[in-house]
Amino acid sequence: MAVSFVHLRLHTEYSLVDGLIRIKALVKQTVADGMPAVAVTDVCNLFALIKFYKAALGAGLKPIIGVEAWVRRGEEPARLVLLCQNLSGYRNLTRLVSRSFLEGQQRGLPIIDHGWLTGHTDGLIALSGGREGELGQALLNAQPDQAKAWLTDWRALFPNRFYLEVQRTGRPGEEAYLDAAVELAAAAGIPIVATNEVCFLQRGDFEAHEARVCIHDGMILNDPRRPRRYSEQQYLRTPAEMMELFADLPEALANSVEIARRCNVRLELGKNVLPDFPVPGGMDANSYFAVQSRAGLEHRLRRLFDPDAPDFAERRRLYDERLAEELGVIVQMGFPGYFLIVADFIRWAREHGVPVGPGRGSGAGSLVAYALGITDLDPLAYDLLFERFLNPERVSMPDFDIDFCMEGRDRVIEYVAERYGRDRVSQIATHGSMAAKAVVRDVGRVLGHPYGFVDRIAKLIPFEIGITLDKAIEQEAELRRLYEGDEEVRALIDLARKLEGLARNVGKHAGGVVIAPSTLTDFSPLYCEQGDQSIVTQFDKDDVEAAGLVKFDFLGLRTLTIINWTVQIINQQRLATGEAPLDIGAIPLDDAETFTLLKSHQTTAVFQLESSGMKDLIRRLQPDCFEDIVALVALFRPGPLQSGMVDDFIDRKQGRARIEYPHPALANVLKPTYGVILYQEQVMQIAQVLAGYTLGGADLLRRAMGKKKSGGDGQAA
């Protein structure tokens, strides 16, 4: 069957202003309606681009990338729809949209200055914006000469790529505009194209859409004074419906298909790129990386062990072998630059008085990271596995979680921006969503309910991460009773359900920073709030990595700030009494007084050990070595707490239960945890010992086991 129509103007939930459409539902509905392509043209932004592109291709649907922009020539801006034909057009659109946020905001609205278009329209097709476009406003204001003059300008900017856009959605002024537009198009020989400015999938979603608009605008639904800018006809009409609607203008439908054929952007996703790390002359990055790692390990070994001890040569051999193995994998996978970049900004932080954490997460399993000063924990001393961090059998980017003092974190990011270029460094956006409690309050407000009525319902929703309205009704008997017995409560919750989970606002990732090898807009459009100098990518962390940028985590940890303050106070006192300054790095890990304090569970303000539940676990376990502290953190998770593992571990440690091993060959693997399988590294070692897995293969098994968990944490921490 011949293709008869393609939607070229559509707002998803990421329009934030008015869109109600979720990406997966859009793709599913478009395919079901037999359309081979669809455009997403969110208002002023490209937040959803990667999600839409991947979902569409996955369903065999052609994604058309675009934006519904505001363009200003005089005092007031007008609508213009821009669609990408090719990669050149995508680059131009990315730069224009970024510039609208960075330079063109007016009352919070990002606007493209008309002058910016000159020289930046290659690869872009423009739709006039209908009655809200510049030409539409001129025609509706009975200014045909002005419309003709502007049309000449638009055709020069978009030669053979400019279309007069027409709609029939039942809104005021549409038919008058359409008649004038068709007349102008015929006189000027310019093509017309039909769109439906889609904001929701089904006609029945109109009320929920209007509620969303009211939430954004701070209005009440039944307020007779509020603007009615939309109609219930702005749903995803089928091609048959559009053919019936525009039976008198078949060319307007045919041109939608022609435009879809002309738009053929191919994005290269999943190929990671890094900036070049500056190395001394005469060396390449791989050689410099190896030299720095070996020098760093030598420094570490001489601090760890006595170089004159008889066993020093044997110890060095073990460490050298492990280092050589890691260097080989890192070079093979192409990641020396990543390690050098991280080591460089950590070095800078320490040299400039910014406290840095010792390292946590799987990155602590890398000896190279320890040698370069990225982490401060010897992985061989604690049987930490490199393959859990970087698996040669599964290519994925390394990811260090770096903790910085809250007071100094921004200084480190500033250093990175200076070193690699401010146009290449940015933080990452997050897209906040309408969560259960908040959406009930929002919907209650736009429905005009009294605060007390809405507050009562919202407070019945459990304060849990990931709670949904459906789960809340299932768990809370009183909420269920109100929902089933009170029509107003039911209407409020049913409307809130339609909005729950939709994107609501843009925020900033807690620690994510990207460093691009060239201008950031080559990889992601940029965003900022009006009057805020803090720039973030428009893509979230998953999408920015899909686009090729590598994320570096600069985490701000208040505990490090508190420790820094404490050390400063202590050393001021020591200076006054002539004592040597305190070096917390020299405090032994087996300090008896520290463990006496720990056993008494006086751990307020101690990172990860300060909650009431953790204090109770400390009281029961009575840790007396550093390994017990590691075990505490691993045990204090839903899986171990709910499975009985905690009681078993404590009983074995305290001698009330016999220490047994699932297999005699696992004694060395499980001895530190009294025969209990507690760590993910142990899962990998068990697969290696019992089944002959490589550690890389064992890591794949570990990941597969994690994906099969039904919920929460499993036993392995």
Image (tube, rainbow, N blue to C red):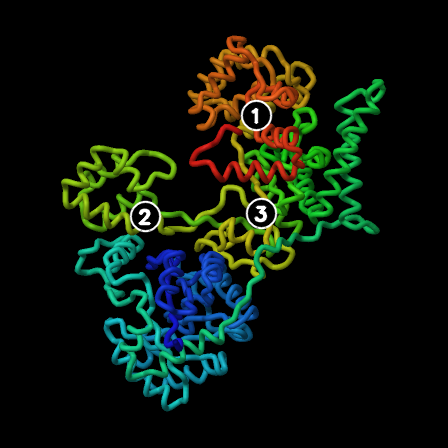
| Amino acid on which the number 3 mark rests in the picture | Lys
Query: Quick one: which residue is furthest to the top in this view?
Result: 656
Mark 1 or 2, which is nearer the eye?
A: 2
The one of 516 and 489 positioned closer to us in this rendering? 489
Residue labelled with disc 1: 563
Q: Quadrant of the N terminus?
A: bottom left
Q: Which mark is residue 500?
A: 2
Badge 3: residue crowd in 10 Å (few <14, some 14–19, many ≥20): many
Distance from Cα at disc 2 to Cα at disc 3: 29 Å
Which of pointers 2 and 3 lies earlier in the amino acid sequence? 2
Q: Does dot 3 land on a helix, a strand or a loop?
A: strand
Which of pointers 3 and 1 lies earlier in the amino acid sequence? 3
Residue at figure coordinates x 61%, y 37% from the top left: 699
- Where is residue 76, by image quadrant? bottom left
Residue labelled with disc 3: 551
| Amino acid on which the number 1 mark rests in the picture | Ile
Say if 422 sits above or below 561 in the image: below
Residue at figure coordinates x 51%, y 37% from the top left: 706
- The picture places residue 301, in percent across and down from the top left corner, at 77, 27
Q: Which mark is residue 438?
A: none
| Amino acid on which the number 2 mark rests in the picture | Glu
- The picture places residue 229, in percent across and down from the top left corner, at 26, 65
Q: Does dot 1 land on a helix, a strand or a loop?
A: helix
